[in-house]
Image (cartoon, coloured by chain):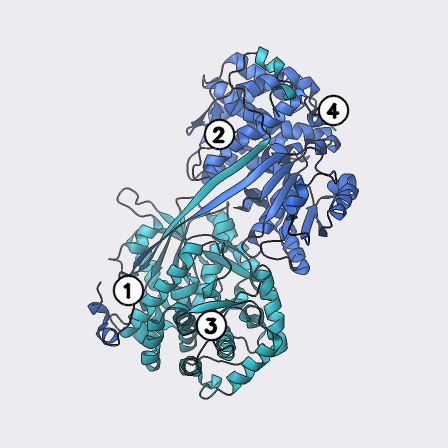
Chain colours: A cyan, B blue
Amino acid sequence: MNGDSLGLTNLRNQNISSIKSYDPNWRVHASQPVDYDVRIIRELLSPSNSSLAQACGVSDTNQNIRCLVAIDSNVQAFYGERLRTYFEAWRIDTHWVQVSGDEAGKTLEAAMRMTEEMTSMGILRRTEKIIAIGGGVVLDVVGLAASIYRRGTPYVRVPTTLMGQIDAGIGIKTGINFSLYKNRIGTYFAPETVLIDPEFLRTLPHRHVVNGVAEIIKMALIKDAALFDLLEANIADINADNLAEVDSPLEEVLFRSIDGMLDELEPNLWEQGLDRAVDYGHTFSPSLELRADPPLLHGEAVAIDMAICVALAHNRGLLSKVDADRTLRLMQNAGLPITNPMFVASLLEEALDSTVKHRDGLQRVPLTNGIGRAVFANDLTLTELTNALAFISEHQYAYAPETVS
Amino acid sequence: MNGDSLGLTNLRNQNISSIKSYDPNWRVHASQPVDYDVRIIRELLSPSNSSLAQACGVSDTNQNIRCLVAIDSNVQAFYGERLRTYFEAWRIDTHWVQVSGDEAGKTLEAAMRMTEEMTSMGILRRTEKIIAIGGGVVLDVVGLAASIYRRGTPYVRVPTTLMGQIDAGIGIKTGINFSLYKNRIGTYFAPETVLIDPEFLRTLPHRHVVNGVAEIIKMALIKDAALFDLLEANIADINADNLAEVDSPLEEVLFRSIDGMLDELEPNLWEQGLDRAVDYGHTFSPSLELRADPPLLHGEAVAIDMAICVALAHNRGLLSKVDADRTLRLMQNAGLPITNPMFVASLLEEALDSTVKHRDGLQRVPLTNGIGRAVFANDLTLTELTNALAFISEHQYAYAPETVS
């Protein structure tokens, strides 16, 4: 199409300065850079530690800072006083909102209540931050609210649970559950910064420690044989206090888990690729986690899913008997379940169908071909699922769920 | 922090292959590329035209295509049959969902209903597209639903209104209103492609034509004096049929509007910069548009806001009397309102306060310093607002809202 066909003669006679070329096809091209820090900071709540204040926006030139602090009831109970003391010491004008930390509270309503708090505070669009302090649920819900309020309001993540510190809190995913569909609604929205203080773990109930260990075992299985060895050597010592201790061998467990996770996430931050090794243990569990009764924690559902994948890999000849044994033993020694009445073959098949939609038409099931390595399967059958469950039932020996508090 | 301080002696003795450096500070860096086409395509619904089918995913190798088509009741009434014929001709398996095209329907509930349709269709995450066909409201609501479902499902925009074709439909913003806060909730989420067929405009009620003209006048005022001249020369001829006509002078109006808008959007797609000339006319209107009774269309609210900005600019000596006159005359000749009982000084001041939050603490009000150029003001006063309204009331001469149908 040229100028004449658009009847521009008249225009040209009018001596218009900027005649454009009249190609009615445009291509919009741009690139959105994302940069954020993930830092392990000890004594984060000590008033002498400036890290959190800086994350709120305090600087030499700006002392007049407001922020919206979102916490759950556990953070309120264990750290509410220290947080208030900290923000007062830095003269940060804080508004507070409490968010449910339970999986059942991961709802659209919770995210919308959060946006109402932003409106009532009159939070500025860019310079006033939201500080989310809590476990994975708080970070997911607050992250979603931050991402959709005015199409994005900056937020800082302070994960306080093991799951949050090594998994849910350090990526850019936000989300809520929608009816029984886990994380069906969400966004990718990077925090400005992630501040991790292992000291928070000291108040974590043991079941939630174990919950996080499931994702650490995942990381070991898919990419870090050294982490697997470290876990095996220290599994009896994994508890809240030991994880929080400076210079303990478990500090390396934390470090390697974070490092491995970021290493996997960074090149695929928006999940352009759907063959994701970090989806290990997340094939069957997303459909079944919320249906189990009594409810499973996320890491527990992931563990049961991982056990199935260990058995699938062994039965396919990808994983030796010794390594399959080691893995199932490690999970059980960690206090994780490897079976659940909801994880039967027919429901596994259904869950796989649902995951296939999430993975755009292919199974893309990560399986270990040796500890510390992963491949993807696209041709799992119902028979294999049945056989995997049989294999697991022969390798249950120590787990007693009632001992987990 | 080095290896020794983490107690790694034991690990080293175990001959671990990949000892990491133990710096507990990570920086995650990535960049998300966005590319999408905006194309003017004539006879888009002719079965011989492959453009829409290709946008749905039809290719030489893939004939087995499903898609979710979201339309409003006007599109259903005027184009439902032709759309069905088109998709049948291309053997596309379509699922349909109807979305309200009214501003009052731009709600969270509408977006969530849309996601329920995606679930019930079982839409694949990446290869099955959502095709949104309608005005700005449909595109905004469907865009939001697409962006939050599984953290992003691809969608195609087919704007059918003038507002959609030159403004709401060609950028990457999605949104819903939240109580009386316009677009308070939304995301940035680029469509895969935007297909614009001016033929759709033939069925647009005249009031909605005029509604779109407001945004075209905006584009002329902030950056395209030639477009302003073209509008002035053709204002009496602006109607649905003339806009839809091939090779009419109004086709250039469409072209320049789209071109100008994309030129403004592309370098600032995620609004990293909040000094946005395209926010001209969007300073007072976002708070007042939804409060007017009888309701205003978006472009009408923008026009009233623009008239205030014309007066503000003139009173500041930025815009000559001649150019202020020309502008207010052009708006009124287009059939746009330049006053409204809701736009009084006290409410303008309130609206400005709200916009200051949206603009991160500064007014950043775009004003024309000559037709086709914009500067930003950060120090508007209540007195100036009052004086601006007085100026406008002296320059009302032709507009009679009851003649607009």
Counting residues from the start of the chain, the first of labels 2 and 4 encountered is 2
Q: Dot 1: what SS? A: loop
B381 relative to A41 in the view: left or right: right
Residue behind mark 2:
B277
Q: Which amino acid does label 2 sit on?
A: Ala
Position of residue A170 measured from the top left corner of the image (x, y, whole percent): 40, 60
Residue B368 x/y as whole percent: 49, 22
Residue at image position (48%, 28%) is B366
* Quadrant placement of the C terminus of chain A: bottom left
Q: What residue type is labelled 3?
A: Gly
> Please, which chain is the residue tagged with disc 4 on?
B
Dot 3: element: helix
| Residue at image location 68% in from the left, 45% down from the top | B53
Mark nearer the viewer, 2 or 4: 2
Residue occupied by mark 3: A299
Which chain is indicated by disc 1?
A: B
Whether callout 2 and callout 1 share a subunit is answered: yes
**SS at circle 4:** helix
Rendered location of residue B152, percent (x, y): 55, 52
Quarter containing the N terminus of chain A: top right
Which residue was labeled with disc 4? B403
* C-alpha separation, residue under disc 4 versus residue under disc 3: 65 Å
Query: Mark 1 sits on what residue?
Result: B20
> Which of A338/B128 is in front?
B128
Q: How far apart are marks 2 and 4 (CA)?
A: 31 Å
Q: Which chain carries label 3?
A: A
Amino acid type, residue under disc 4 in the picture: Thr
Sequence-first disc among 2 and 1: 1
Is the C-beta separation of discs 2 and 4 under 8 Å? no
Q: Are marks 1 and 3 on the same chain?
A: no
Q: In this view, does A213 lie to the left or right of A13?
A: left
Is residue A93 positioned above or below A320 on the image?
Answer: above
